[in-house]
Amino acid sequence: MTSRNIVLPSAVIALSIAALLVPAPHAEAQEAVTKDARPAPAVEAREAAAEWTTAAPLPERRTEVSAATDGDRVYLAGGFGPPVGEERATAPRALWAYDTVGEGWEQLGEIPEGVHHTAFAYHGGRLYILGGFRETGFDPVPNVRIYNLETGEWTEGARMPTPRGAAGFTVLDGRIHVIGGNAEEHVHGPEHGDVADDNSVGTHEAYDPATDSWVRLAPMPTARNHLGAAAVDGRIHAVLGRADGDMEMTVHEIYDPATDSWTTGPDVPTGRSGVAVVSHGGQIYAFGGETFGENARTFDDAERFDPRTGQWDILPPMPTARHGLGAAVVGNAIHVISGGPQPAFHFGNAHEVLRIRR
């Protein structure tokens, strides 16, 4: 039996802002990437009629978290927590659920092992934790952990063929796709795409919960980590990320499962990494991020891509700039949770909600 610890919410404060995963040959898939796509200009969404509000903060401060939803509740797992003693960070195991009706947080016991930068998804009454990095280090783990929301029990699924962390992930047609990320040093070969010097990969593998099996698909053309991915209209959009010192990629690549191939989409207006990406209403949303170097900072940027127009819109900025955050959609609200307010090992519990009016 799992313990349940109820945390009551704080008052909701409105911040009114308006205006607004067998594959085809990989060589063929690579050739399908278009090199001459012209980015459509980004425009400010003047009549988007979106509003940011603040909701009950996550009961603990974290960064590099992952979020998922069943359409009613928002779930949050993994990440780094504040340091204890001389440690640079901790690996909190509490699994949290947010009730969007009662507007309060509930602890659903603990995850089996501390992980961060993990793929996290809901499907068929279960939560899936796929890969990530172990505890507070950066060793990729192969495990697939499955939590039954009805019984509160954990089981193990088939292990990832290529353990990775900081990958993009999304659910499409009942399969959980894990794309890109940082893999182990021995990973090479065309099935992983062009492996970068920092072990960033384009590896694309999908897990089928119905058969407890993995399939390898055409690799993403641009190897990168700390990217985001979301599915809309039967395709997966993989956006942003970083590799080999480029912390501000604007890359946007689109996977079509019908042809097992990738094409290039319009660049994201604001290059960054460590983002949260979701789909809602047939559009792709990207939130937050970070960069390092002389211009080290976190981003409050919120941007939206409409596949019908091929255009990126600039949305009202998040009230709190942060990276390593999680995002999930319930109804017409996008919950953007936790994340570090400064680059690297900084921790936050912000919970802000973008309510879409159209």
Image (cartoon, rainbow, N blue to C red):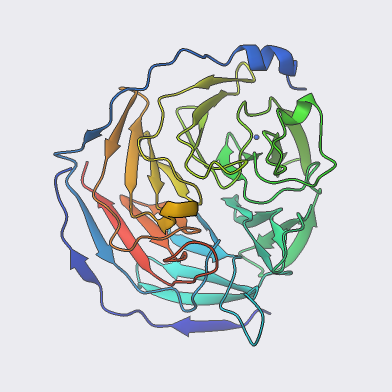
Locate residue 169, reporting x and y percent.
59, 44
Q: Is residue 286 left or right of residue 92?
A: left
Locate residue 188, reporting x and y percent.
81, 33
Locate residue 199, reporting x and y percent.
72, 42
Q: Residue at x 47, y 64 (%)?
A: 339
Q: Residue furthest front?
A: 294
Answer whether residue 184 is visible to the viewer in this image: yes
Whether residue 310 is situated above or below residue 346 in the rendered picture: above
Whether residue 172 is situated above or below residue 141 in the rendered picture: above
Q: Residue at x 51, y 14 (%)?
A: 35
Q: Is residue 231 left or right of residue 128?
A: left
How many labels sit on residues? 0
Q: Residue at x 18, y 42 (%)?
A: 20
Q: Is residue 304 left or right of residue 110?
A: left
Q: Is residue 141 left or right of residue 125?
A: right
Q: Residue furthest right?
A: 186
Q: Residue at x 51, y 63 (%)?
A: 75
